[in-house]
Amino acid sequence: MKNVIQEDQLYKEVPSELIKTVETDENGNFTVQLAPGRYSVFTKEEDGLFANVFDGEGNVNPVTVKQGEMTELNIDINYKAVY
């Protein structure tokens, strides 16, 4: 959190190494193979990057990938929602 630049509800700058970029299918599903480790996942939106989940350690949308396991991730892209 301390290294990202956020404007409104989108991130304008995430100063870290980009590991992979993937596209979703027509239903919004995606798969990606990653080495075991901890990653932050963002969606690319028209005006920036989106993520809305945080842990208590200052990580943005953290996901842990374990050797030989599939990790399921649901991303609610709700920054334009009106409640």
Image (cartoon, rainbow, N blue to C red):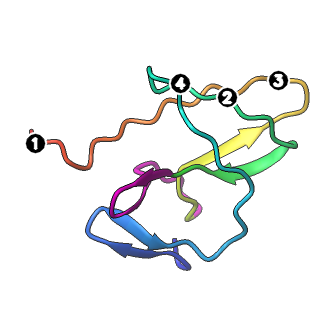
Sequence-wise first label, 4 or 1: 4
Residue 31 on the magenta span: no
Give the number of the mark in front: 4 or 1: 4
Dot 3 corresponds to which residue?
Answer: 69
Dot 4 corresponds to which residue?
Answer: 29
Q: Secondary structure at mark 4?
A: loop
Give the number of the mark in front: 3 or 4: 4
The numbered dot on residue 82 is: 1
Q: Secondary structure at mark 1?
A: loop
Sequence-wise first label, 3 or 4: 4
- Circle 2 packing at 10 Å, graded few (<14), some (14-19), many (20+), is few
- Circle 4 packing at 10 Å, graded few (<14), some (14-19), many (20+), is few
Sequence-wise first label, 1 or 3: 3
What's the amino acid at mark 3?
Answer: Glu
- Circle 3 packing at 10 Å, graded few (<14), some (14-19), many (20+), is few
What's the amino acid at mark 2?
Answer: Thr
The numbered dot on residue 31 is: 2
- Tell me the magenta residue range: 43-57
What's the amino acid at mark 1?
Answer: Val
